[in-house]
């Protein structure tokens, strides 16, 4: 299982780059960034890719609705060209409240949207000419995109059965968030693997993202997690996964404890079938540093 860290983008840009350089120096294998309401994720990774060798890069995740798949394909291939082919492109639907209220777009039939999106995105990224006409999305290119770079693997943020099926049949795998190990083992992995096998595709990647805090005060850390990550307990897709896990809220799936305890929790993520781990360190500066140290120590183990 590759070990990655979600880096903090809520800081000046030079500090963001320095942070990823530090992760690379520590031995972390992948630096992941989200696309929310700050820096553009792919532009950020293009810069980081030039400045920080020796670490893979990933988006967790870029929302699909605001970007046409041909534009996203060009952006992703540009990052590949800039970084020497180190990108994993994680994409997702985002959430109804964001797509409809922030962007003013329809969130109607999200599964259909993702199927049509991937029908354009994946062949474009893989260097093919695209001719597709769906119910809500079309593309007809004059030829392949003129970017000489390897195709990045596309991971779909899929949690429900329908979306996992789409990811297994049409993409390289899935990337989860706020989804505990029991749910990964008994729902995420078997569902997406069955879909991939049914489509004659290779075994899919499963990247598991969870908050991490190495601490001597687990109760305080879980209280902090409940505060910092509270929004994820209210969004329907994450709420459904927390309910499957039997978790009251995000604090219950966060990886919290001593160095040994957190290491064991990460090893369990590997044991249930994850191919990648994306840890989101939180807590005090000392706890964040300790969390990164534990994750780095697990590389190759």
Image (cartoon, rainbow, N blue to C red):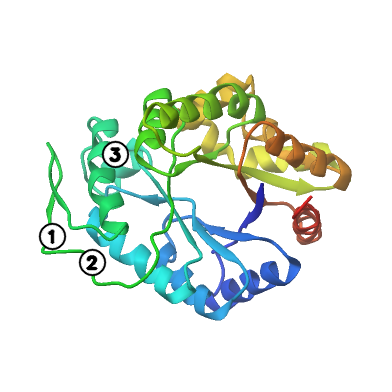
- What is the C-alpha distance between the residues marked 2 and 1? 8 Å
Q: Check residue 145 in the rendering and tell me which mark sits there, or answer none.
A: 2
The residue located at (36%, 34%) in the rendering is 169
Q: Percent x, y for residue 276?
A: 61, 47
The one nearer the camera, 256 or 100, is: 256
Q: Nearer the viewer, mark 3 or mark 2?
A: 2
Question: In the rendered image, is residue 155 in sight?
Answer: yes
Label 2 CA crowd tier, 10 Å (few <14, some 14–19, many 20+): some
For residue 193, side relative to residue 77 (left or right): right
The one nearer the camera, 225 or 202, is: 202
Looking at the image, residue 31 lies above or below residue 248: below
- What is the C-alpha distance between the residues marked 1 and 3? 20 Å
- Residue to which mark 1 is pinned: 141
Q: Quadrant of residue 9?
A: bottom right
Q: Percent x, y for residue 168?
A: 41, 34
Label 1 CA crowd tier, 10 Å (few <14, some 14–19, many 20+): few
Q: Check residue 297 in the rendering and tell me which mark sits there, or answer none.
A: none
Q: Check residue 114 in the rendering and tell me which mark sits there, or answer none.
A: 3
């Amino acid at each position: 299982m590759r070990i990655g860290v979600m880096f903090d983008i809520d800081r000046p840009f030079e500090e963001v780059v320095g942070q990823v350089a530090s992760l690379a120096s520590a031995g972390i294998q992948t630096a992941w960034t989200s696309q929310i309401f700050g820096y553009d994720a792919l532009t950020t990774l293009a810069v980081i890719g030039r400045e920080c060798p020796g670490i893979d890069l990933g988006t967790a995740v870029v929302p699909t609705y605001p970007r046409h798949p041909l534009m996203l394909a060009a952006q992703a291939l540009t990052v590949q060209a800039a970084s020497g082919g180190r990108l994993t492109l994680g994409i997702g639907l985002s959430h109804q409240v964001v797509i409809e209220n922030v962007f003013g777009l329809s969130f109607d039939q999200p599964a259909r949207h993702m199927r049509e999106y991937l029908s354009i995105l994946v062949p474009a990224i893989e260097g093919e000419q695209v001719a597709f006409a769906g119910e809500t999305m079309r593309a007809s290119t004059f030829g392949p995109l003129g970017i000489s770079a390897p195709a990045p693997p596309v991971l779909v943020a899929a949690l429900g059965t329908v979306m996992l099926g789409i990811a297994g049949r049409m993409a390289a795998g899935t990337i989860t968030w706020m989804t505990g190990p029991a749910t990964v083992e008994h729902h995420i992995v078997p569902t997406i693997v069955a879909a991939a096998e049914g489509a004659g595709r290779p075994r899919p990647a499963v990247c598991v993202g969870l908050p991490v805090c190495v601490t001597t005060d687990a109760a305080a850390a879980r209280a902090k997690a409940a505060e910092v990550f509270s929004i994820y307990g209210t969004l329907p897709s994450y709420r459904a996964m927390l309910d499957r896990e039997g978790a009251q809220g995000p604090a219950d799936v966060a990886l919290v404890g001593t160095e040994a305890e957190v290491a064991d929790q990460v090893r369990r993520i590997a044991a249930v079938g994850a191919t990648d781990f994306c840890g989101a360190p939180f807590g005090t500066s000392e706890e964040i540093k300790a969390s990164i140290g534990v994750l780095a120590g697990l590389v190759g183990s």
